[in-house]
Image (cartoon, helix red, strand yellow):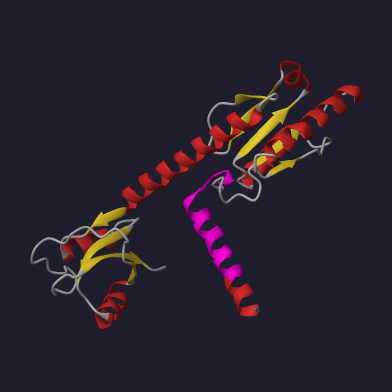
Amino acid sequence: MLKKITFCFFMELLLVLCVSEAHSDDGGLIMPPALAAIQVVILPLYAKDPQQQASVLDAAAALRKDLTAVGMRVHIDDRLSMKPGAKYFEWERRGVPLRLELGMRDLEKGIALGKLRTGGEKFEVPLEDPSNKVSRALTDMKSELKSRSEQLKQRLIFRIESRSDFNKRLKEDEPGMMLVPWGGDDDDEDSIKEETGVTLRCYPLDQDELPDEQDCPLTGKPSRRWAIFAKAY
């Protein structure tokens, strides 16, 4: 049992590290909605009048109830003595996908103001029926993160057709990930690693058909399948 728990903890930690590498920016972490422990954070704003403050807090609680009723993971940050800007920064750094700001003026309009962690303009979320608008926003964020990841993958993967292509990539500041029609064995891997510091990282699940009579540019042997190589640091 202890081994299973340790393995699960390790896999969760590895998942967080992978997400951190793929979905982070200068402002901190960006968590995909499906993986975020908190998907929506509600930030009730300070009001001088006690009755107005109570109304804002009640509306925040009702908003959380509506969103949790449809399965969303929601947190209310009711630290009223903390300035809004500081709270925005904290939750952005933690990567929470969506924040909802709620002040007295917003309450009078029957809305909360939404802001996605991926950026963009603030948008109105109706308090009467918030789940549809919030669900669409999180779905849009998921699509945007997927698109960003695909663009990053395409930018950093280079198809290697010759040994000279391979050597040129190694001289770049960002060698990236090199897609090689691989035909080597374990001994060849060891030799390449010792010579260049490059290791075989994985075999892509989606394997394009190899050209006829394709030879491996790193070993000269007949290619068997595509492999990803990258420099080890």
From this view, report whether residue 168 is shown above or below residue 199.
Answer: above
* Residue 190, quarter of the rendered image: bottom left
**Is 84 in front, or is 114?**
114
Q: Position of residue 183 (x, y in %)?
A: 19, 73
Q: In the picture provided, is 182 more to the left or to the right than 132?
A: left
Q: Is residue 49 visible?
A: no
Quadrant of the drawing holding the C terminus: bottom left
* Residue 232, quarter of the rendered image: bottom left
Q: In the picture provided, is 32 more to the left or to the right than 76?
A: left
Q: Residue at x 46, y 43 (%)?
A: 145
Q: Residue at x 53, y 60 (%)?
A: 15
Q: Position of residue 122 (x, y in %)?
A: 59, 26
Q: Residue at x 60, y 49 (%)?
A: 36
Quadrant of the drawing holding the N terminus: bottom right
- Magenta part of the protein: which range? 8-30
From this view, report whether residue 38 is shown above or below residue 173.
Answer: above
Magenta span dominant secondary structure? helix
Q: In the picture provided, is 59 more to the left or to the right than 215?
A: right
Most distant residue in the bottom direction: 187
**Is 213 in front, or is 22?**
213
Q: Position of residue 213 (x, y in %)?
A: 8, 67
Q: Is residue 20 magenta?
A: yes
Q: Residue at x 24, y 79 (%)?
A: 185
